[in-house]
Image (tube, rainbow, N blue to C red):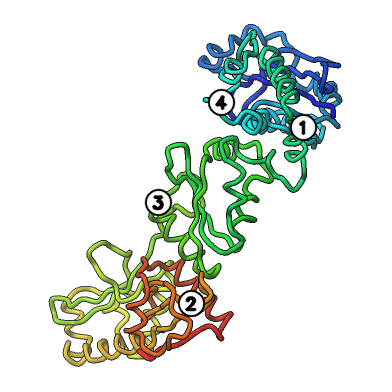
Amino acid sequence: MIYAVVDIETTGGFAASNGITEIAVFVYDGSQVVDHFETLINPLQPIPRFIQSMTGISDEMVMNAPTFDTVAAQLFAMLNDKIFVAHNVNFDYSFLKHQLHECGYNLNVQKLCTVRLTRKVFPQLPSYSLGNICRSLDIPVKNRHRAGGDARATVQLLTLLLLNNAQPHIEQFLKKSSGEQYLPLHLPKHQIEQLPRKPGVYYFRNQKGKVIYVGKAKNLRQRVRSHFTHNGAGKQKQEFIRNVHDISYQLCGTELMAAVLEETEIKRLWPVYNTNRKQVSVQYGLYVFEDQLGYVRLAIERKRKHLYPLHTFGVLWEGYRLLWNMIERHQLSPKLCFVEETTGNQYLEEHFDKPEVYNRRVIKALQSLQDELPSFAVLGDGVETDQRSCLLIEKGKFFGMGYLPEKMKIDNIKTLKKRLTPYPDNDFIRGMICRYAELHPQKKVSFIN
């Protein structure tokens, strides 16, 4: 095996918007270094003060250094067809792959992380940062936090690992089926291997145990692995990978239950990396009230706290479509339903039936609405073999879900509700359940309101 042992210094933590300030590559055949390249790089952007302080590399030092494009061909030749080795390999690899791609080169090589490899060979070390490993194993380091010094130390570490029977671990890491080279630095591989191949919801947690991402899966192990197959160069992806330290999960009987639980958990926990689904959904409601003249009036308004709508809608036009349908079917007044403008109480008194006459039509319309809102259960597989899952929609609203004994008779909604766990209702969840019921009518059990 021929290794390209790499270390870089950069202007920041992710490749898409930051540059390389220094790079060192040692080509190592397992016993000696056979080639070496090292240079400062002009990143064509300022180096932040704290990074200058940590590395000792200043803007003045890189001012006359070569830009990356001038050394790209030489770097690609040194890295191509070698095993790319670095301490926290995904960081260095993401920068070099991105920068080489910008110069027209496609770097696609096997990777080996000396952090993960050292954990396998020396599992009892107190810390696996490069500096602490070198102190624990008596590896001398010169020019710490400089590319050349850290890369030389990594070569010495790799040599020591090979002398301590690291080869079987290296071969395992490099198997395509392993996926070890793509995993976040702090995430033990066994946590993924222990995930079941069943539906459920998974939680990524940071170093402090806080949930930073919630996802659903038809196959938990396969879905979690897919997060780390292609690690992009963007800031969010790189920060996400660095922050994943732990995984937990909750099994679900079906993919539909997992989707409902995922939506609920995102709204409950507000994980920092669930950016696409964290927005508060603005809902609208159908409200009823009696005005000063005694008319019972209907109105579509934004959903508000402490006001209880008769029905809710995810978008405004759905509410108005329902309201116009009620107006036309039950001869209600568009003006009294706030879909046409009025000119005051005197106008209402002169142009409409008396309140007691008009209100009877409103009450009939509301009763018809309640009768027409569906009540049904969706049944599916359970987590255990002797149970089945159940999600309940009651009068157009999501009540909750849970698991029932396989032989339980489903004919009474009151009895069913006692067996289920209530969950928050929202338009997104209702929509998922209703669409599923339409596509799978054989799994739907309807109830008469």
Cα distance, mark 4 to mark 1? Answer: 20 Å
Tell me the residue at 50%/55% (across/down).
Answer: 249
Q: Quadrant of the N terminus?
A: top right
Whether 397 is drawn above or below 92: the answer is below
Q: Which one is nearer the viewer's eye here, 115 or 44? A: 115
Amino acid type, mark 4: Leu
Cα distance, mark 1 to mark 2? Answer: 48 Å
Which of the two discs, 4 and 2, sits closer to the camera?
A: 4
Which of pointers 3 and 1 lies earlier in the amino acid sequence?
A: 1
Cα distance, mark 3 to mark 2? Answer: 29 Å
- Density class for disc 4 (Cα within 10 Å; few <14, some 14-19, many ≥20) is few
Q: Is residue 76 left or right of residue 271?
A: right
Instruction: Name the secondary structure under disc 4.
Output: loop
User: Which residue is under mark 1?
Assistant: 167
Amino acid type, mark 2: Gln
Which of pointers 4 and 3 lies earlier in the amino acid sequence?
A: 4
Asked if the residue at tag 2 contacts the one at tag 4, i.e. Cβ–Cβ closer than 8 Å, the answer is: no
Q: Is residue 421 left or right of residue 347?
A: right
Say the numbered circle drawn on residue 387: 2
User: Which residue is under mark 4?
Assistant: 125
Amino acid type, mark 3: Leu
Seen as rendered, the residue at the extreme front is: 164
Q: Look at the image and tell me whether residue 16 can be seen.
A: no
Which of pointers 1 and 2 lies earlier in the amino acid sequence?
A: 1
Instruction: Name the secondary structure under disc 3.
Output: helix
Cα distance, mark 4 to mark 3? Answer: 35 Å
